[in-house]
Image (cartoon, grey):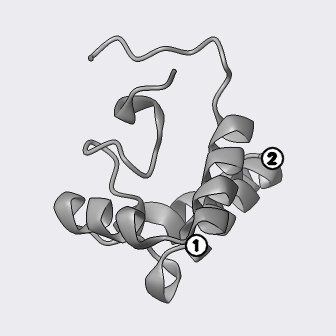
């Protein structure tokens, strides 16, 4: 079972809304196009193609996602984070 810190879109320390475009560009530049694609595809599941900058609003956005969108987000998360990784902060 993953904690919220293991899920990039839930982790309050990660602001994907603000950093996603630049991060995706940098990931491509360092030779990680698959990871960049996962990031972009995850963001596209949110309204306006980007999660809210505000953590609480981002959680509300997640609550409003359709089951198919949540499943897609889970699948993207599974692809992006090794299963053996566990949060050491929680």
74 above or below 85? Answer: below
- Residue assigned mark 1: 45
Task: Determine whether label 2 and label 1 are within 8 Å by CB.
Answer: no
Which comes before the other along the chain, label 2 or label 1? 2
Residue name at image x 81 percent, y 51 percent? 34
Q: Is residue 28 left or right of residue 45?
A: right
Considering every residue shown, the one lying at the far bottom of the view is: 48
Q: Nearer the viewer, mark 2 or mark 1?
A: 1
Q: Mark 2 packing: few (<14 Cα in 10 Å), some, or many (20+)?
A: few
The foreground one among 26 and 81 is 81
Numbered label tally: 2
- Can residue 75 be seen here? yes
In the picture, the quarter occupied by the C terminus is top left
| Residue 80 figure quarter | top right
Q: Report the front residue among 58 and 67.
A: 67
In the displayed structure image, the side of residue 34 where residue 76 appears, left or right: left
What residue lies at 80% left-to-right and 47% top-to-bottom?
A: 31
In x, y percent, where is residue 63?
37, 63
Image point (37%, 31%), residue name: 5
Q: Label 2, on which residue?
A: 31
Instruction: Classify mark 1: helix, strand or loop.
Output: loop
Spatial distance from mark 2 to mark 1, Cα to Cα? 24 Å
**Residue found at x 67% / y 66%:** 68
């Amino acid at each position: 079972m993953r904690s919220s810190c293991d899920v990039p879109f839930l982790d309050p320390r990660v602001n994907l809304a603000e950093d996603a475009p630049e991060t995706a560009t940098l990931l491509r530049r360092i030779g990680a196009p698959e990871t960049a694609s996962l990031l972009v595809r995850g963001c596209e599941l949110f309204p306006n193609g980007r999660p809210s900058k505000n953590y609480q609003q981002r959680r509300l956005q997640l609550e409003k996602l359709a089951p198919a969108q949540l499943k897609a987000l889970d699948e993207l998360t599974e692809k992006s984070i090794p299963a053996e990784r566990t949060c050491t902060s929680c």
